[in-house]
Amino acid sequence: MSLPGVVDDLRKIVGRDAVLHRPEDMMLYEYDAGVRKSTPGAVVFPQNAQQVSEIMRTASAAHIPVVARGAGTGLSSGAISHAGGIVVAFARMNRVLEVDVENLRAVVQPGVVNLQLSEYVSHLGLYYAPDPSSQKACTIGGNVAENSGGPHTLLHGVTVNHVTGVEVVLPSGEIVYFGGKAAESYGYDLTGFFVGSEGTVGIATAITVKLLRKPEAVATLLAIFESVDDAARTVAEITAEGITPAALEMLDGWTLRQVEAYCHAGYPLDAGAVLLIELEGLREAVDEQAIAVRGVCLLQKARDVRRAKNEEERALLWKGRKTAFAAVGRVSPSYYTQDGVVPRSKIPAVLQHIGEVSKKYDLIIGNVFHAGDGNLHPLILFDDRDAAQFERVMAASGDILQYCIDVGGTITGEHGVGLEKRDAMPLLFTEEDLAIMTDLRNVFNGNEVLNPGKMLPTPRMCREIAGRSHNPVLAQEGL
Amino acid sequence: MSTATTPMRFTRELREICRAEYVIEDPARLQAAQILGVTPAVAVEPASAEEIAAVLRFANEHGLNVVPGGGFTQQQTGNTPAPIDVLLYTTRLTDVEHYDPGDLTIGIGAGCTVAQLSAKVGADGLLFAGDAPRPERATIGGVLATGMTGPLRHGYGGLRDYCIGVRFVTGDGRKGKGGGRVVKNVAGFDLMKLLIGSMGRLAIITGASFKLFPAPRQTSTFVAEFASAAEAIQYRNTVLRSPLSPICLEMVSPHAGELLPGGVRSGKGWSIYLRATGSDAVLARYRSELGAAISREVDGQDESEFWRVIQDFSSTLPERSPASVLISLSLPLADVLPALNELESVAASDHLAYAVIGAVGVGRLLVGLWTADQHANLSNAVFAFRERLPRDASANILHCQQEIRRQTSGWAKTPTHFESMKAVKPALDAKDILNRGRFLF
């Protein structure tokens, strides 16, 4: 069936006003927060799992690729449609279905915005822990697909540690449940397997998440260093003290100056680097840890360690961190961000390496990242009108990723593989590893109707043997 | 007793893969390794993932049933196995794959015991949170495959929360991996989650990486006694609503308390055991928050022994009371008390005794049921209890007598879509080589 025919079918499922397909409407949905673009054929806005199921049945029957989309804040092109494919957008499935205080759980639709969930349960003294920097916009459904992180994952873990159950629509259209409200369920942990599957296994239509009690006390410290190296060494020293901060973030000198110019967070302009350290828990424990952390920082040659005196000061320090990408966006036409992870002990070495890469490729690279986890976010500046420069950006990026892998790290800590890092997967995984993952995907999504071509590279061999895809849209693209 | 017959030519091939000295044919040793009455035809002790892959590829060619084994602390669970053609020990895979205390991570071979791993990282002031029963025998591979950990689950989460990488060989003999060595990693499917608790049905785990934690420098355990389960649960709720964050929060029923050794045993009621960590000031705060309900405080050597006994409870009960049925339960927090009430009512109507112990703050419980009356129908009671469990509950039987095992095959309960789980199996083990027929399907 052709796409126009499918549009009629989609309208029958969700109503006339809930399907977009005119080219000018498609422009809004051709990108996410990454660097790639692709124009879908239709965008559909379901209101419940039953409609998602019918959409999947229709798309599967017509062999038209489908991608689920939350707010489009992803950085790995995970929510980019195949050209001419169907985008299932969750703007109308944005309700908190249940807040279960006794069980410390909430059941939400995938379109619920991350921060709004925390705000929704705040009056109960509860919150939802994973806090990506885009939390004002990004949705829980997207967080589940990408297994998103955020600064506070150091203590509390990433999305998968906070999801105990999912209602899933499979490519066949069947609606199934994995897990529930219990912390763990017997049998294969398909909930855990589903989280981070980047929309290639099924579409979540309801998500059961943990709610945490707000801590009694929070201390936010800003440690100011003359050099990146001193700050980097401090990271490992803090954990060696037996302290696990709730968050431990680093901004290098160049980045903090951009941030300061943008939002006046109170970072000193002449610093080599700052660490933003947050401690939380029992009042007594937080006070002791704040003193211990201050001691470690000073021992590692911190120039000064400031503690936020009130919620206002705390919010300002965090505003600086969370708007760092936006601040950099002001001074460069484009930037490319990266998400490699290294073992904590390798942070000083990798930052030195990034410095060398910056010189070698003649590019400005800022560093603002989750230091406590070793999760880097080098921001490589470029002008997207300069093709030669963009090639250097990609080469520099590849160089940094390779370094992360060489020291025992990985290519993505929280942004996902998507299209963007798909071809880097063989650097990390053997052909056999990837074949196993592909076989597992095919259990659920054998015809690759859901988010085709994402995360797992197509083995060259298979392509040569199998020829063109059975999927007409993929076949058009020669996949 | 049944014994599989493995033809001599199979043994010959296995000797070529693993070397003769690591192929066990001695009937006495094989007899000692019997699983639920089934004696393996042969056992092998491969030295590497490559050798395991070769054994499994060979098993695929000939359709052999291969049962993976570690320290044999949890082998007596599940359905009676099909005839075991090959018992495959992972105990020689003990290499440290990566370890730098500054990273707070370690990668270790599946055959390393929990005690060895804990001692290694403990020497650097670090904690491995997988406090499985019988840590001197339990291997890392076995702990992951069964998902069995102890009281630290309250403070540090389950294995799914701190296992950051896994290496394995699939049932069809392919070497694979998921995750890696770093604490944050979203590259590829989360195969750690898929294999934790998969009971050796999908793949043989050959190694894994873990997030470690700073070891507590000082701890203390607070004991509170209650007349009823309802009061104990109410106290649990008070603790969960407080700013306190204990590392263990365990509930012990009256009969479970009787099974504990004298020094650990408390009164005759329902007890809550709360383990806290922190400085003197922090522990003083616990004392004041927990209030008058606390009847006792334990620290030092007594405290370690105490938690060790709790940790080993799942083996203590079957040893003391071989005719008992031991059930593992995972429940939403608010379902714990209703489930205990149902247990009470089932036990009362069938004249059974029961014991409950577990990490009540995260809804994980072990339930033991037994009877002095030989004619009482234990399996009926077990089915009646299952029927009354709430929708989101998980339950499986860890220990029971052979006769009950036959009657309760397929008893296990989970909210997860059964057909989806079933569909995953052939993707990794198309010929059903691994642990044939033992778990779920």
Image (spheres, grey):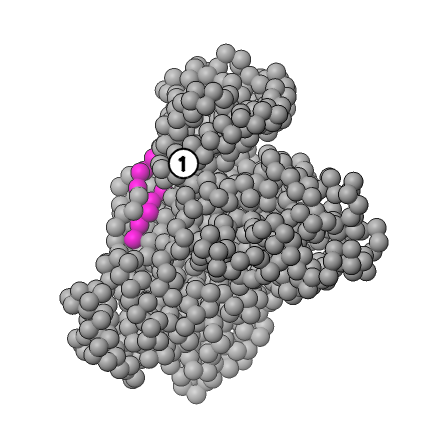
Q: Position of residue A389 (x, y in %)?
A: 53, 25
Q: Quadrant of residue A257?
A: top right
Q: Residue at x 67, y 57 (%)?
A: A64
Q: Quadrant of residue A171?
A: bottom right
Chain letter behind tag 1: A
Residue farthest to the bottom? B375
In this rendering, does residue A446 appear at all?
yes
Left or right: where does residue A2 sit relative to residue B439? right
Q: Which residue is mark 1?
A: A402
Kindly report the secondary structure that dominates the magenta region of the rendered protein.
Answer: strand
Q: Residue at x 53, y 26 (%)?
A: A388
A215, A45: nearer the viewer: A45
Front residue of B310/B439: it is: B439
- x, y percent for residue B441: 47, 74
**In the displayed image of the protein, which residue is found farthest to the top?**
A270
Seen at 46% across and 40% down, the residue is A411
Q: What amino acid is labelled 1 in the image?
A: Gln
Verify whether residue B105 appears in magenta: yes
Evaluate whether residue B362 shows in this view.
no
Say if A464 sits above or below B215 in the image.
below
Residue at image coords 58%, 57%: A469
At label 1, counting other C-alpha atoms closer than 10 Å, the crowd grade (few under 14, some 14-19, many 20 or more) is: some
**Picture quarter with the N terminus of chain B:** bottom left
Note whether B362 is above or below B396 in the view shown: above
Q: Residue A11: horizontal and vertical position, in percent?
A: 81, 57
Q: Which residues fall within the magenta stretch? A: B99-109
Q: Is residue A343 magenta-colored?
A: no
Q: Position of residue B185 (x, y in %)?
A: 46, 43
B120 on left or right of A69? left
